[in-house]
Image: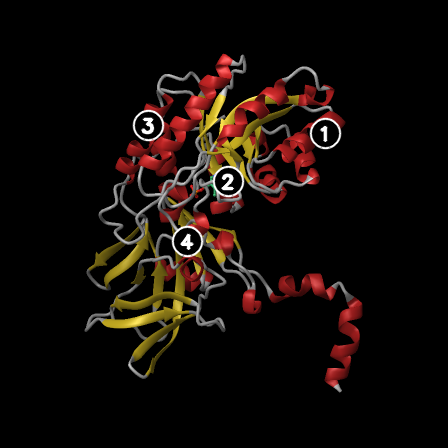
Amino acid sequence: MAQTRFSGVATSRPFQSKTTSRRGAELYCGQLRLSTLAAEYGTPLYVYSADHILDRLELFQRALAGREHLLCYAVKANSALALLRLLAEHGAGFDIVSGGELERVRAAAPEALSRVVFSGAGKTAEEMDLALEAEILSFQVESEAELALLAQRAARMRRKARFSLRVNPDVFAATHPYISTGLSEHKFGIPIAQARRIYGEATGRAVRKQRWLEAYGVSVHIGSQIRSAEPFGAAMARVARLVRELERDGISLRSVDAGGGLGIDYEDAAGFDPAAAAHAYLYAMEQALDGLNVRLVLEPGRFLVAQSGALLTRVLYVKKNGRKTFVITDAGMNDLIRPALYQAWHEIVAVQPRTGRAITADVVGPVCESGDFFARDRRLSPVEPGDLMAILDAGAYGMAQSSNYNSRPRPAELLVQGREARLIRRRETMAELFAPEMEQVAVLSDPLKSMKK
Ligand SMILES: *Cc1c(COP(=O)(O)O)cnc(C)c1O
């Protein structure tokens, strides 16, 4: 069962500069020097603070203490097994979007499978079977065709399938277009106006196949990195109206899943108050739910883990092309794609800052793409080759979106808790990168042999 170990709600970031008399200012993660961690484990290196993640979890748990709730961490934000284990030990459930993420939860915390909700617009029959067999809490169903397939698979396996229709509330939320999901023009969910009919048909006694379906709840997710409480409240108000209509139809849902999407402030970290953001968000939803007696499920991803993590990288070169200065790091867009993919802004700081005049530079990786940048025209303290830099707020959608592009092995990952740093994923090896091809002996033998001659 969930043990409690909370360090008290800290609102500050885990990566802080400390001044030691001998060395000057230096960046730490909690009580550990990042320069020491980089020397021991190499770069690029992801470093996460477990204490910070637990503080964020507690922020939600405390604010929701008065209502039946379940926090289902969105695995896609950062699917490291050690993080899943940490969150499960503290009572979290999980929001998954693939069979692979289901297997991650099973590997990290099998006891938490009963606290899993399964989202995603393209679930396959095989993925449904896996999840039915694991007896997850609820399938968040995104179309009538998916519901029909789920009914079929459940009947075949003789397993109960609890489902929640993911409704599309047609609510606009200001965020990057790639991560906005709540408008009718997006691929996600079922138009909310159709939901009542579908619940009615799915719970009707007439269809034998439907015997294995159980209408458990309703879900909504309007997008990611949303910085205002208002669209969450608007979406929830529409969902609450649907729940009341269904009640009149004799269908009483047990849960309302509000999805994830609460954002952080990447650009003004010092001015960002996570407690205030969480409270405004939850208050807007409480208002909209207005006395409905349902279990509130939330699927936070970014808000829980983004600020817990940094990507440590070493400067390879500093070069000038015309009037521009480029700081070339050993981390690239394959390690952290957010700036390239979403034009995302990340704070970048020197781990052991040098004194002297600030420079303006692009911070770029070694990948052969002009989109391989972390920052453009950024004011930085002076840097030299060999210096360490930390790209902050990289705990969400960093490692999770990493790739092997340019045949680059993925970084290692460290989890810091108290005075201890634990390697939770070692650096990938070349042999691992090539393995799926090396098995195909036919591909290799001829061309490689002939090349040697
Ligand atoms: C991505 C996603 C989340 C998590 O979003 P965050 O912005 O990281 O909180 C939650 N639910 C669903 C269905 C998602 O697709």
Read off the residue under disc 1.
Answer: 152
Q: Looking at the image, is mark 3 or mark 4 earlier in the sequence?
A: 4
Q: Which mark is residue 63?
A: 3
Q: Residues within 10 Å of mark 2 (few under 14, many from 20)?
A: many
Q: Looking at the image, is mark 2 or mark 1 earlier in the sequence?
A: 2
Left-right relation of 357 to 429: left
Between tags 1 and 4, which lies in front?
A: 1
Between tags 3 and 2, which lies in front?
A: 3
Ligand 1 near label 3 (Cβ, under 8 Å)?
Answer: no
The colour mode here is secondary structure
Mark 1 vs mark 4, CA separation in Å: 44 Å
Give me the residue at 22% from left, 47% from top.
Answer: 271
Q: Looking at the image, is mark 3 or mark 2 earlier in the sequence?
A: 3
Comparing 67 with 354, the one in front is 67
Give me the residue at 77% from left, 70% from top.
Answer: 443
Identify the residue at the far bottom of this view: 453
Give me the residue at 54% from left, 15% from top.
Answer: 251
Q: Which mark is residue 129?
A: none
Badge 1 vs badge 4, beta-carbon distance below 8 Å: no
Badge 3 vs badge 2, beta-carbon distance below 8 Å: no
Whether residue 150 can be seen here: yes
Badge 3 vs badge 4, beta-carbon distance below 8 Å: no
| Three-letter amino acid code at the position of disc 4 | Val
Left-right relation of 319 to 207: left
Q: Residue 84 carries which label?
A: 2
Whether residue 58 can be seen here: no
Ligand 1 near label 4 (Cβ, under 8 Å)?
Answer: no
Tag 4's secondary structure? strand
| Three-letter amino acid code at the position of disc 1 | Gln
